[in-house]
Image: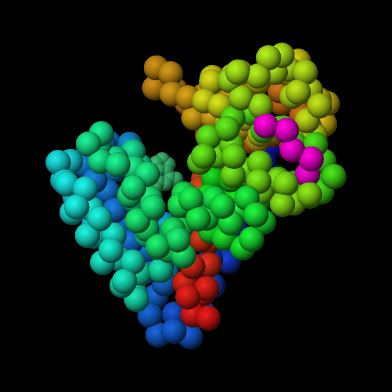
Amino acid sequence: MNIIDGKKLSAEIREQMTARAAAYEARVGRKAGLAVVLVGEDPASQIYVRNKIAACEQVGVRSYAYYLPADAMQAQLDELIDTLNADKNVDGILVQMPLPKHLDEQATLKRIAPDKDVDGFHAVNAGRLMQGQDCLAACTPSGIIELIRSTGTPIAGKHAVVVGRSNIVGKPVAMLLLKNDATVTICHSKTPDLASFTRQADILVAAVGRKELITGDMVKPGAVVIDVGMNRVDGKLYGDVAFESVSKIASYITPVPGGVGPMTITMLLKNTLDAAEHAER
Ligand code: GUN
C-alpha cells in the first residue's frame, strides 16, 4: 500500500502556479486577482479565508478581502458581488460558505459571474461540467483527480465508485471521472448493500461525511481509495475511510489529514489563474 501525499502534491502544483502567476503578471502588467468575501464571524470560515488569502500571497496572486458583518443584508452582499463582477482587476470571486441563515446561498452563488466563479458552484459551471465543456470545476473534485493521476493509475476504463452525492464533491467528482473515461457509479446514504458496490471499485471516492464508514472488507484488493471525509469527533479528525483496515487492501490511499484537504486551496489558485488567463482572450 502507498500513501498519496496531498501536501507534497499540493506544494508541487503551487510551484507551477507561482510560475504561471509570474508569467501572467509579466504579460498583463498586474497580478491575477482573487476576491474573497466572508460574511459574519464563523470561526472555521475565518480560518479557511485566512488560509486562502495566505495561499494567494504565496504564489503571487493578489487577494482582495471583504468582511461583511453577520447582520449584512442580501442587498449589500449583492451590491458587492456586482461591483466585483465588473472589476477588471478581479479574476475570481469566492463567497465563503455557509452564509448566515437570513441570507440566500443559492441566490448569492447565482449572482457571481460564471467566468469568475472559481469555486465552480454556479449552476452554469455545474451545467458546463455536466456537458463536458471547459469550465471552472469545483476545487475539491479537481484536487481528487490530480491525486488519482499522481499515482500513475490510468482513470480511463476503470470502475470508479463515488459514495456521496453533494453538489460540492460527490456530483462534480463523478462528472470529472466520467470526463476522464471512467465507468462511474454514484452511491449515497440511502444505497442498500453499499459494500456490494464499493467492492467493485477500482477507484473509490468516499465523500459522505460518516466517520470510517468504509472498512477493509468493503474494498477491492488493489483499489485506489480517496478519502474526502472531515469528521471531527472530540477534537480529532476522522475520514470516511477506516484507514487501518483499508490501507492493508488498497494499492493507494489518501490519509486524513494530509490527503484531499491540502489540494482544495491549491486548485482554487489554479482556477483563479485559469479564469485570469481565460479573460485575456
Ligand atoms: N465552505 C466550505 N468549503 C468551501 C469552499 O470550497 N468554498 C466556499 N466558498 N465555501 C466553503
Q: Position of residue 245 (x, y in %)?
A: 70, 18
Ligand 1 appears in which quadrant? top left
Of residues 229 and 18, which is closer to you in this image? 229
Image quadrant occupied by the N terminus: top right
Query: From the viewer's perspective, is 158 left or right of 129?
Result: right
Give the extent of the magenta segment.
182-186
Residue at x 78% of width, y 44% of height: 182
Of residues 92 and 185, which is closer to you in this image? 185
Label total for image? 0
Say if the magenta span includes residue 267: no
Q: Does residue 204 sit above or below 270 in this rendering?
A: above
Q: Position of residue 111 (x, y in %)?
A: 35, 56
Residue at x 25% of width, y 55% of height: 78
Residue at x 29% of width, y 59% of height: 81
The dominant secondary structure in magenta is strand
Q: Does residue 249 sit above or below 271 in this rendering?
A: above
Query: From the viewer's perspective, is 273 left or right of 147?
Result: left
Q: Classify residue 221 by image quadrant.
A: top right
Residue at x 61% of width, y 63% of height: 134
Decide if residue 263 is in sight here: no
Q: Position of residue 53 (x, y in %)?
A: 35, 56
Query: From the viewer's perspective, is 263 left or right of 65?
Result: right
Q: Position of residue 220 (x, y in %)?
A: 81, 25
Color encoding of the figure: rainbow
Decide if residue 115 is in sight here: yes
Of residues 40 and 14, which is closer to you in this image? 40
